[in-house]
Image (cartoon, helix red, strand yellow):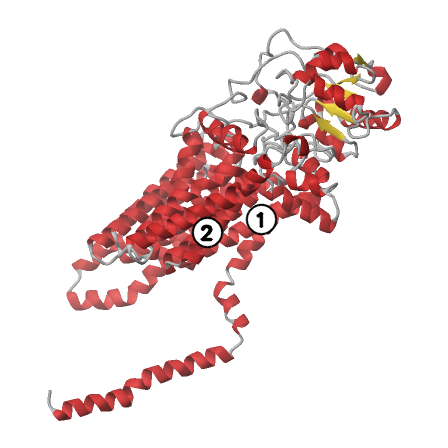
Amino acid sequence: MNAPTRAGIATDVRGDAFAPFATRSRELAEQAREPRRAKLPARHAPLVPVLAVAALFNTYALARNGYANTFYSAAVKSMLRSLHNFLFVSFDPGGLVSVDKPPLALWLQAASAKLFGFSPLALLLPEALAGVLAVAALYWAMARSFGRPAALAAALTLAISPSFVAVARDNGPDPLLILLMTLACVAALRAIRGGRLRALLSCALLIALAFNTKTLAAYLVVPPVALAFLVCAPGPLRRRVAQLAVAGLALVAVSVAWLAFVDLTPPSQRPYAGGSTDNSELGLTFAYNGIGRVGGEEGDPGKIPFRPGASVVTLSKPEPVTPRSIDIYPALGRGRPTQIRSEAGAVGALRLLDSDLGAQGGWMLPFALVSLLALVASLLAARGAHTMSRRDPRLAGVLVLGGWFLLEATVLSLASGIVHPYYVSALAPGTAAMVGAGAALFAKLARRRDRLALLLPVAVAATSATQIVLLERERYLAWLPVVLAAAAALLPAIALWPQIGSTATRLTPTPARHAHASVAAPARARRSTMAVALMLGLLLLAPGAYATTTWLAPVEGTFPAAGPRAAAGPGGFGLYGIAEPRTAKRLVRYLSTHHPGGRYSVLAVSSVTAAPLILMGSRAAALGGYSGDDPALDGAGLARLVARGEARYVLLGGAYSERGGNRASAAVLSACRRLAPRVWGGPPLRPYSLVLFDCAGRERALARD
């Protein structure tokens, strides 16, 4: 290289070469002086109306739901009585049996009740707000991977998903579970972008908190996150594996911390672990609440036991109908009595679209599935063209959010254990993510005249057909199927018109063709984008309208569901049927004036019967846990309580008494004195009716049984 050239280079380096950097520095300084608050909202302002929609769906007429799931509401009231009850999540004020779920959701509700006072809204609002935050979290998870338009579409889809709205209006743990799992996806994608252990540990902590909300259901997001980190994170493979190992250890440690605390506490110093057979939270987690839910266990459909021992008058054989088909529940639309949706249909690939699950979470499933296929195909095409690397944020988004969607759908479709219809609420974030990403991708493919855009008519046709079937089955919005059918035929053609019109363009002379293309391309692009947006809006109309049916009547707290003919709850204290309000009030009045036990005013068979009494101020408890057959107490244990003056009255019959109770309820039948209904204002004697027993002075007889 000659001297003038070297001198020129030196001059460039000392002078003009720094000009771009100086200009950029001035721009950064000016941006720093500008108020950042004015710029960030402008960038994400479209999210605000979406969050407003989510808040409206979750909170409109929320107070009418009363205490919703009275099992959890009664537990929160009991937890507020003492730190001991709070730490061990005791269902009853006396600390006899705990709730059969981890503590985090109930701790959150207890904090709200402590701050605002114990009331239905104080218990319902935390979960409703968790649903709104989950919508925001999904937006943030999507924005960096697929762009803001895809993120907005996904957030809106989640906000109006029927099952998601139904659980967000209840006080169960599901909204908090969904929020934490979605936040874990946000942290995972951040960890994948930067390859930092701190972000991966944040993801592990969020999953562990979700585990402490609803146990193993939280771990369905672990395989997609681990796979995405291994494939997409920067750094050598050995380093990625080591980071995952450290995060896995942290995940397990935080997950089991509360379980270990409970199990290491002597059984005599804590409540019985409700739902377990061995008084162990660890056994409850991996048996009843874990493998049993997927593989099947007693209490599943077709496996509901029928035994005498917890009711004065029992049937000689099971009733000819199963609990899921008893028409005693008022419909949300105030129509005739309806069946409660408590269990999913037969195992199989189409379960998510059957009569029990389809209307809760199946409205956008075909679009999500075809979108996932299109996303994978586009990534493979980019890899074949050497324009994609493993660091592509779209690949990480597909592996994390698409993987969660596929795994959740597979488990719900193939689980042979308990699958309540509201379980599909956990599928809503993954479905919404794929819908949003797919809609944005189809608009982009249509503008580029890519062959993969031909999957758009497939997605629209399959989704429209599914929604038409669901609408006809539910007898809802009779005018909409015609609109959907017309839109499915027209809008994809408008969106793909650039691709259709490209043939005519190619037949024109070259100069005219280029001039025409330069003028028409922006207009065609806008037309394609607007057609896809309009199409998505029409497809979201049916699920959004269906979700608003949750406003019509109180939610059925145990099995929340949307739909004009879904079962409604009674509101208030959750009393109807055998344990109707007048009977409960008379019972509470009698107990308060007739020397009940010092620790327990009455011991019912199951938590379902005891919960309204606790909410009405009674020191009730369930001697057999939620299902009435937990071995929490036997005859000798009950005898000790009676001898110490801690208990006196036992209430047999009611919910779950057909399962036979436990040894304590059997001892009451043979040893204690039955009080006539007229004495305390109870109902006439019939199968499963509530019957009150007085066990005072019967300690020896109880101990013998």
Q: Can residue 438 be seen in this view?
A: no
Q: In the image, is 520 to the left or to the right of 160? A: left
Considering the numbered disc 2 on the image, is that residue within a helix, a strand or a loop?
helix
User: What residue sits 53% from the left and 35% below the top?
Assistant: 422
User: What residue sits 34% from the left and 54% below the top?
Assistant: 394
Estimate how packed mark 1 is, as few (under 14), some (14 to 19) or many (20 or more) residues with alpha carbons within 10 Å.
many
User: What residue sits 57% from the left and 24% below the top?
Assistant: 277
Q: How many marks?
A: 2
Quarter holding the C terminus is top right
Q: Which quadrant holds residue 407?
A: top left
Do the numbered discs 1 and 2 sit on residues whose CB atoms are within 8 Å? no
Estimate how packed mark 2 is, as few (under 14), some (14 to 19) or many (20 or more) residues with alpha carbons within 10 Å.
many
Q: 310 or 400, which is in the foreground?
A: 310
Q: 366 or 615, which is in the foreground?
A: 615
Which residue type does callout 2 highlight? Answer: Cys
Give the residue pinned by disc 2: 203
Give the residue pinned by disc 1: 130
Name which of mark 1 and mark 2 comes first in the sequence.
1
Query: Residue 412 appears at what percent x and percent y?
Result: 44, 33
Query: Residue 573 appears at what percent x and percent y?
Result: 73, 33
Considering the numbered disc 1 on the image, is that residue within a helix, a strand or a loop?
helix
Query: Residue 199 appears at what percent x and percent y?
Result: 44, 57
Q: In the image, is 674 to the left or to the right of 609? A: right
